[in-house]
Image (cartoon, rainbow, N blue to C red):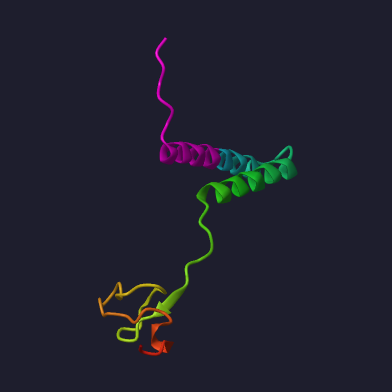
């Protein structure tokens, strides 16, 4: 018997995402065919797949951003250089600390 190694964590996550997206595609197809025999059931399964997708992606909250004082482009709040003009940025909170 040939045994295959279990997929790595990133590949397992990708596989889960593919399966979830396939389920969503199938449920969308069911919703768009007319007449649909059970639109409420398809919609419920689609919502469940979307919830699964959200959990799998685990994006978290939107990162905090701030404006570069030189070029006015938006960048990551904790950046030490602007991603657009490469100007050096003062770390957040450093401007309020007393020297010492």
Majority secondary structure in the magenta region: helix
What is the magenta range? 1-22
At 40% from the left edge and 90% from the top edge, which residue is drawn? 98
Q: Residue 24: x, y in percent?
A: 58, 43
At 73% from the left edge and 37% from the top edge, which residue is drawn? 37
Q: Nearer the viewer, residue 24 or 51?
A: 51
Q: Residue 28: x, y in percent?
A: 60, 44
At 40% from the left edge and 21% from the top edge, which residue is drawn? 4
At 47% from the left edge and 40% from the top edge, which residue is drawn? 13
Q: Residue 14: x, y in percent?
A: 45, 40
Residue 72 is left or right of residue 18, and the answer is: left
Residue 9 is left or right of residue 83, and the answer is: right
Is 49 magenta? The answer is: no
Q: Quadrant of residue 40?
A: top right
Q: Residue 60: x, y in percent?
A: 53, 59
Q: Nearer the viewer, residue 21 or 82?
A: 82
């Amino acid at each position: 018997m040939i045994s295959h190694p279990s997929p790595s964590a990133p590949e397992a996550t990708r596989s889960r995402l593919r399966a979830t997206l396939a389920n969503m595609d199938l449920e969308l197809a069911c919703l768009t065919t007319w007449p649909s025999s059970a639109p409420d059931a398809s919609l419920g399964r689609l919502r469940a797949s979307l919830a699964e997708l959200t959990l799998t992606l685990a994006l978290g909250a939107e990162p905090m951003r701030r404006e570069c004082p030189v070029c006015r482009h938006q960048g990551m709040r904790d950046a030490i250089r602007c991603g657009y003009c490469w100007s050096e940025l003062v770390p957040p909170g450093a401007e309020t600390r007393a020297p010492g």
